[in-house]
């Protein structure tokens, strides 16, 4: 058994920020299932929303967030995160993050702020079109200098360890986690009274997504199995503009292109989003994604197009170098041609239910970043609020857990040893093709039946198939030695089931959940969908 003061699972902006702060209070284990730089954060293009301009205000940012969230945001949480933003941005800058600046014309410089859908003012701080990569670079460099942080790369958390799982009845709390060393196949028992999930989202549960391969919903699945409350999993945000190309199926085309004047057009070159919302191309993401979906179905087209070729070529290349180079490699010159795009799964607005400090319903377990449901996003996330939330919640979580005693006052709990992992009669996996087939089937079922537009019948079909798949996957899990493939498949099926169950419970359309059987919002149902394992 290995013992740490803090156990952090995930190495994106939330996990790294927490680890850096927690290292001042004790020994930190930072577990990441790939190399330390592989995270959803590193893929973020647009930027981080924060009030930094005199032309903007906290009230405007709060209003925009509440409007995008379609009635389900917790206004108290929204207001506190928005007002805490500037201090967290300053911390990022002090950590070495370089945000783009512009010349003010009098020899000075100021932050170059972008605008994205749903924002009434320019408030998006960015580093060209690779903001997440720049933040990840700076935070990883800071982690490398910190001697109290022990980074375990290529280690995947298997499950959380709780008193309940050890057989105790009268009380429950998180005690640590079992962690697979992917190199050796050994499963470690890691003991900590402060376990922090920062595992990101679940975009890979869908066939088409803007997320990297690591986004398999691990944190939500582990928390659910441990008995923590999970909320609002029906609200999966589909980004309106993912590149439509057979050689690059999950490349995001940032919303900032539309913020700089890019226009969505159909195959005839005609604009169309204004028919669905007066804000047109800069309406919130749920509205724009449904508009694109409806236009594709109306015309029978495979995609729509995002055109910024009317802007000066030098500006486009300078502002969006990553997108320009990636598209050019595929034969698309975005300074001269429109970009073929389709919506794709992008961000989970629900997750492990937490308070405003990241505390979950299970004592000893905390969740920050995309894995958490804090009340900020409601039924639809306002663009670029995610990185802001991750910074603020990581900071608050540090303050909250640092004040708590490292261990319970009871001697029996302080001295409790975790049982070693036992594989029993499990054998090595002999047929990977079955696992890959089930992985593909889950993602296709979710795309076909639980996408941008839903019906009760489609959701019920998905539920039936997922129940069958869950039984098969349980056989893999218990019959074979654990591997990353088996664990990710198990987590994907769990999260898919939570999404479907949550969607079936919401008999209305709100934000990202749109069902043809109940196409209008119902104020009587304007509440969170909360699930907890019996």
Image (cartoon, rainbow, N blue to C red):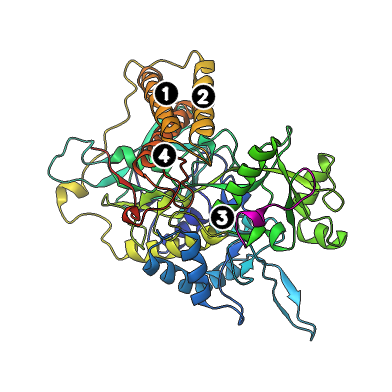
| N-term mark: 4 or 3 | 3
Q: Which residues are magenta?
A: 267-278
Question: In the shown orientation, is residue 454 left or right of residue 77?
Answer: right
Q: Are marks 2 and 1 in contact (CB under 8 Å)?
A: yes
Q: Residue drawn at (21%, 43%), measured in percent from left and top?
A: 416
On whether residue 156 falls in the magenta region, the answer is: no
Assign a secondary structure to mark 2. helix
Q: Which residue is mark 3?
A: 144
Per the image, label 3 sits on a secondary structure element best described as: helix
Of the 4 image quadrants, the one containing the N terminus is top left
Indicate whether 173 appears above or below 496. Answer: below
Numbered badge on residue 441: 2
Alpha carbon separation for disc pair 4 and 3: 37 Å
- Nearer the N terminus, badge 2 or badge 1? 2
Query: Looking at the rendered structure, which numbered label has been put on residue 465?
Result: 1
Q: Which mark is residue 22?
A: none
**Sequence order check, earlier mark of 2 and 4:** 2
Where residue 128 sits: x, y (%)? 72, 60
């Amino acid at each position: 058994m290995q013992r740490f003061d803090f156990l952090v699972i995930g190495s994106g902006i939330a996990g790294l920020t927490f680890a850096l702060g927690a290292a001042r209070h004790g020994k930190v284990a930072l577990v990441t299932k790939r190399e330390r730089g592989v995270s959803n954060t590193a893929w973020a293009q647009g930027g981080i929303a924060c009030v930094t301009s005199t032309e903007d205000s906290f009230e405007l940012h709060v209003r925009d967030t509440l409007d995008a969230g379609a009635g389900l945001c917790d206004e108290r949480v929204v207001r506190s995160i928005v007002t805490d933003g500037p201090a967290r941005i300053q911390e990022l800058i002090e950590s070495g993050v370089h945000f783009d600046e512009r010349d003010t014309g009098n020899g000075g410089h100021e932050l170059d702020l972008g605008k994205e859908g749903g924002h009434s003012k320019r408030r998006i701080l960015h580093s060209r079109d690779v903001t997440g990569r720049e933040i990840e670079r700076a935070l990883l460099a800071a982690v490398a200098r910190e001697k109290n942080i022990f980074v375990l790369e290529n280690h995947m958390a298997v499950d959380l360890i709780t008193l309940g799982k050890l057989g105790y009845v009268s009380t429950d709390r998180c005690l640590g986690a079992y962690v697979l060393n992917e190199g050796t196949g050994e499963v470690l028992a890691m003991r900590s009274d402060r376990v922090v999930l920062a595992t990101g989202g679940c975009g890979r549960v869908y066939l088409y997504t803007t997320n990297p391969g690591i986004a398999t919903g691990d944190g939500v699945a582990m928390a659910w199995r441990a008995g923590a409350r999970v909320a609002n999993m029906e609200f999966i945000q589909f980004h309106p503009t993912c590149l439509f190309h057979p050689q690059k199926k999950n490349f995001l085309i940032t919303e900032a292109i539309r913020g700089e004047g890019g226009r969505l057009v159909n195959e005839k070159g005609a604009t169309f989003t204004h028919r669905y919302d007066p804000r047109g191309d800069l309406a919130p993401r749920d509205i724009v994604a449904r508009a694109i979906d409806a236009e594709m179905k109306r015309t029978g087209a495979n995609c729509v197009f995002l055109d910024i070729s009317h802007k000066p070529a030098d500006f486009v290349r300078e502002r969006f170098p990553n997108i320009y180079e990636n598209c050019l490699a595929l034969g698309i010159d975005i300074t001269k041609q429109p970009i073929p795009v389709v919506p794709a799964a992008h961000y989970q607005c629900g997750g492990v239910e937490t308070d405003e400090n990241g505390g979950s319903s299970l004592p000893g377990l905390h969740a920050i970043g995309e894995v958490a449901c804090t009340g900020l996003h409601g039924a639809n996330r306002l663009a670029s609020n995610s990185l802001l939330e991750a910074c603020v919640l990581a900071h608050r979580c540090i303050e909250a857990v640092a004040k708590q005693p490292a261990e319970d006052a009871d001697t029996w709990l302080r001295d409790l040893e975790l049982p070693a992992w036992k594989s029993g009669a499990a054998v090595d996996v002999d047929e990977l093709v079955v696992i890959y087939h089930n992985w593909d089937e889950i993602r296709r079922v979710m795309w076909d039946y639980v996408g941008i537009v839903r019906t009760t019948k489609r959701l019920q079909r998905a539920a039936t198939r997922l129940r069958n798949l869950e039984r098969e996957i349980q056989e893999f899990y218990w019959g074979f030695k654990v591997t990353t493939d088996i664990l990710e498949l198990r987590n994907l099926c769990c999260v898919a089931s939570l999404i479907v169950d949550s969607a079936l419970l919401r008999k209305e359309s709100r934000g990202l959940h749109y069902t043809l059987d109940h196409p209008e919002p119902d104020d009587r149902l304007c509440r969170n969908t909360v699930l907890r394992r019996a």
